Image (spheres, grey):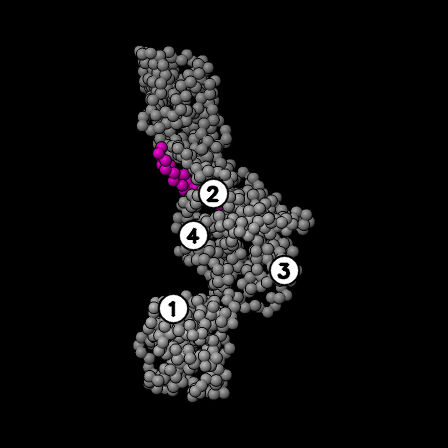
Amino acid sequence: MELSKEKWSEGLKKIKPDVKNIFYKGKIDLLLDDSPKLAIVGSRRMTEYGARVIEKWMPVLVNKGVNIVSGFMYGVDQTAHKACLDNGGNTIAVLGWGIDWPVATEDEEMYQRIVEVDSLIVSEYPGKTAPLLWFFPQRNRIVAGIADAVLIVEGSVKSGSMITARLANRFGKKLLAVPGQVTSRVAEGTNGLIRDGKAKAVTCAEDVLKEMGLVPGQLRLEVGRIDDPLVSLLADGERSVDELSRILKMEVSQVLGKLTELSLCGMVSESEGKYRLM
Amino acid sequence: MMLARIESVACVGLESFLVEVEVDVAEKGFPGFSIVGLPDKAVGEARERVKTALVNSGFAFPQKKIIVNLAPADLPKEGSAYDLAMAVGILVANGDINVDGRDESRPYGEGNKIEALFYGELSLDGSLRHTKGTLLVALFAKKEHKKRIFLPVLSANEAAVVSDIEVLPVRNLKELILHLMGEKKIEPLKKIEIKSLVEAASPEFDMADIVGQESAKRALIISAAGGHNILMSGPPGSGKTMLSRALPGIMPLMSEEESMEVTRIYSAAGLMSAGEAVVRRRPFRSPHHSTSMAGLIGGGSKPVPGEVSLAHLGVLFLDEMAEFPRYVLEAMRQPMEDGKIEISRVAGRVEYPASFQLVAAVNPCPCGYLGHPTKECKCSIREIERYKRRISGPILDRIDLHITVPAVETEKILATVSKGESSFEIREKVMKARQKQSERLLKFGIFCNAQMKNKQVKEFCRLEIDGVHILRLAMEKFDLSARAYFRVLKVARTIADLEGSEAVLAAHLGEAIQYREKVF
């Protein structure tokens, strides 16, 4: 399906050189809504290290509602798509060939899966356009363009990832890089970006969230929580569980459950048995 | 003149062995009285006790050469319980009493052997003293198909709980001899039913008598319901000791087997009081922090049960846990893991059960007043940190519930607080929850949630999607380890069982997360 130009998001319009068309399969809302999007790109020759970083960080990112954008190439790209879907997240795959071009057999399962679970596949090229070498760098400008931040996991100096990195800098997107071993070929690119001050080094998923302006580990606050009697009671000063249950005439178990919720929202903290508002 | 063989029992740890007391009274030879068969000091001194007791009971002590052999001769014998067998042996061997023949009035005789076990310590006046280990003797008799045992009247009740054997309570030597001669019968004890005794025992401390401390009480209920170890942190005087004393009273009533198991240990350790039949309440032990390692986990050159075994199926309360020497606490890891303790010494290897529920109490800092509403804490930050590091990770890993017990401001409370549930009511709920757990877990050889391994946690603590979400967030926010994750799930399972819910709901999880491990 083609996305009509009226519906294009600001992000798409800003991409230079201009994107001609957007063809898609799956849930196009992912591209258009204002959910946080992180592009994860890197080398096709990914090492075990890169895979581990992605698999370890992904649950935290997905849990926070971050959608993962990548280029559907084997290596880092597909690992990112797969880890994202495994953790129940949404992913956007940007293809370097026509939207209907038959993908290689080994990629087909992933391709089907993205469509089936209501994630999104997009491409600039219509129908069965066959992939050409220069399509891939072209595709990278869309990857960088639609994401809020770009995370480079691994990449050598002359890889496509470095192109994406340059584009991200040009579009004014946050550029993040995972530091690697200085002796590793696939880490030369990422370490170089960090050394030159072009990318920010991130060493854990929380770092990524912070860079994207999201605070780790918080439930989204439900409206109306503020006038909860428990909250207004704590606003007057710190209290123990016993006092809270006595004053509110609530069972201890209920008070504790509520305090857990409020702590997870980041509203309440505890020390030495006393709870207080943050 | 002749040789008498009297049977008695040796108790080593919780095991018992048959000991044949052979007594030879010889006409020839220099008069004397010697005991062979590896007797210890207490057995050796039986010579004086037996001699005096016989004389004071109106028998003439034979002025002949008396040899007592305790067979098997290579098993070390200890204690005073062979007195009775020796005294009877001497009388038989000397021909003072005639147990020969099988007529109605003298039913036990067969040659020079008496078909019964004799066990008990003699007093100088010929009466029998309270002797430890009589339950073990009775169990041994049942196992070995011995029909009759003669025991001191003060200790015989312990044995009367065992079925299929005849327990004859002996007040003194004279009565025993009259009985053996068939002149005046001693009536065997009626079997004592454990169940009614256990049920009739009221809890020592009632939860309803504890004012305030609602959250600590709630945690104790969960602890009792799931068999979870618990750590309480709070300033001195906040009631940690009182709370933990109430725990045995809300744990499920002991079954007959459990009561018997505990009694076995107490009987072997000589901690049963005279006339007591069984331990009716779950034990509560609170060793002081100066207790030695042998005192806590058991030991000595002849291994005796330690506090962990005396707390078997009950509560072990470690007050000021951080003050215990580290190596003593580390030694508790095996019993906490396996529910038993193995003690190896030169004198032998002994195994005692030690499946207890741990209640640990700690102060929040060395002086105890950190976070106290009125008193000032005088500790430096460094002191506090060092204090908190004293309990090692592996021990904390075995504690599922961590709570803070705040200082009580009595005046404030008395006005507003209503009396809580009584221990009796709570116990009903706890037993219901336990019932569910054992139905679920018995096929794995365990009976409460605290004993679940990770595999069972995965199977029985499945969460709904919102629960998964909350737990993930909590792990991130509170930086929970994988171990802590499983502990939270176990506690949530117990809360669900208490509420009678099959599924572990988000509400249960929310509460469980508040009992997570804090830096104590």
Q: Are marks 3 and 2 on the same chain?
A: no
Residue B328 at x, y percent in the picture: 45, 42
The C terminus of chain A lies in quadrant: bottom right
Instruction: Classify B319 as above or below A8.
Output: above
Q: Which of these two is toward me, B271 or B365? A: B365
For disc 2, the chain is B
- The residue tagged 4 is B452
Compute the Cα span from label 4 to label 1: 41 Å
- The residue tagged 1 is A180
Q: Is residue B343 magenta?
A: yes
Instruction: Classify B259 as above or below A244.
Output: above
- The residue tagged 2 is B325
Asked if the residues shown at circle 2 and circle 1 are in contact, with their CB atoms under 8 angstroms apart, the answer is no
Is disc 2 surrounded by few (<14), some (14 to 19) or many (20+) residues within 10 Å?
Answer: some
Is disc 3 surrounded by few (<14), some (14 to 19) or many (20+) residues within 10 Å?
Answer: some
Magenta-highlighted residues? B340-358
Compute the Cα span from label 2 to label 1: 45 Å
For disc 3, the chain is A
Residue type pointed to by label 1: Gly
Residue type pointed to by label 2: Pro
Q: Is residue B348 magenta?
A: yes
Residue type pointed to by label 3: Leu
Compute the Cα span from label 4 to label 3: 37 Å
Asked if the residues shown at circle 4 and circle 2 are in contact, with their CB atoms under 8 angstroms apart, the answer is no
Compute the Cα span from label 1 to label 3: 46 Å
Q: Which of these two is toward me, A34 or B261? A: A34
Q: Inspect this view and state whether residue A121 appears.
A: no
Q: Residue at x 34, y 18 (%)?
A: B67
